[in-house]
Image (cartoon, grey):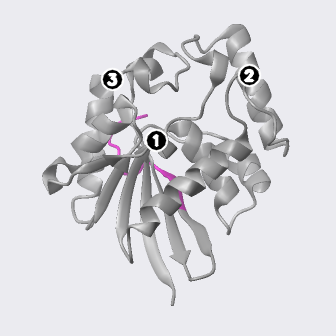
Amino acid sequence: MIIINRIYFVRHGESEANATKIFTHEPEANYNLTEKGIEQAKYTSEFFKNIKIDSVYSSQILRAYRTATFIVKPKNLSILKNEKFNELNLGLLEGKPIEDKYLESYNTVINNWRKGNIEIPFEGGENLIALANRMRNGIMDIIDLSIEKTILVVAHGGIISGALPVICDNVNHLDFYSKHGNHVDNCSITICDVNKTAKKIQIDLIDWNNTSHLLQPV
């Protein structure tokens, strides 16, 4: 028997950290959505207006949870937090400005990942192996609770763009990074189908970084 679940991954709307160009991954940082981020979340809610959503998850981080609340408000659905969807752990880059030596440090790790050196971590943080395993485990958590369901997960750019190309069975992550880079936009929608049998789980990428529902530039 094959059990198919569709998961919509949404990156949170623009946050105060995005607007002020700050590296952040810590749940305690509490960067909220900007007015633009709220509007993006409302546009995303319109996208889901005629889509039946069975369950909703978000990371533990405020900007993702707030985005989820705006998206599902018309549906009156509860939101379950799962730490496995938290942002990529950037280690010592937490709270640093996205500029100069800090941006160079970030790009050094990302460029290594794009070359296949996925074991290289951010200092004090995660490597791509750990990130991908965390995302896969998060998907396993929610799939274990769902059968042939449609699921919404509101998370972050680092984990969506980093982990999904690695764990999806129908893409080669190195080719994918070469073509698409390592970025997804605020409130973009990425879709995966998850096929689960008694022996294995298969994750297929269906759509990537879709922003057609947003009525303003992101």
Q: Secondary structure at mark 1?
A: helix
Query: Which residue carries the number 2 mark?
Result: 123
User: Does label 3 or label 1 sit earlier along the sequence?
Assistant: 3
| Residue 6 in picture, x, y percent from top left | 43, 68
Q: Nearer the viewer, residue 84 or 77?
A: 84
Query: Which residue carries the number 3 mark?
Result: 32
| Residue 171 in picture, x, y percent from top left | 70, 63
Residue 35 at least partly seen: yes
Q: State how far apart marks 1 and 2 are (Cα).
A: 21 Å
Q: State how far apart marks 2 and 3 are (Cα).
A: 26 Å
- The amino acid sitting under disc 2 is Glu
Q: Is 49 displayed left or right of 154 in the figure? A: left
Q: Nearer the viewer, residue 114 or 36?
A: 114
Q: State how far apart marks 3 and 1 are (Cα).
A: 18 Å
User: Does label 2 or label 3 sit earlier along the sequence?
Assistant: 3
Give the numbered dot on residue 83: 1
Q: Secondary structure at mark 2?
A: loop
User: From the viewer's perspective, is residue 3 above or below residue 91?
Assistant: below
Q: Residue at x 63, y 81 (%)?
A: 199
Task: Give the mark toward the camera: 2 or 3.
Answer: 2
Q: Residue at x 40, y 42 (%)?
A: 187
Specify the quadrant that holds the C terminus: top left
The span picked out in magenta is 207-218
- The amino acid sitting under disc 1 is Glu
Quadrant of the image occupied by residue 168:
bottom right
Q: CB of mark 1 within 8 Å of CB of mark 2?
A: no
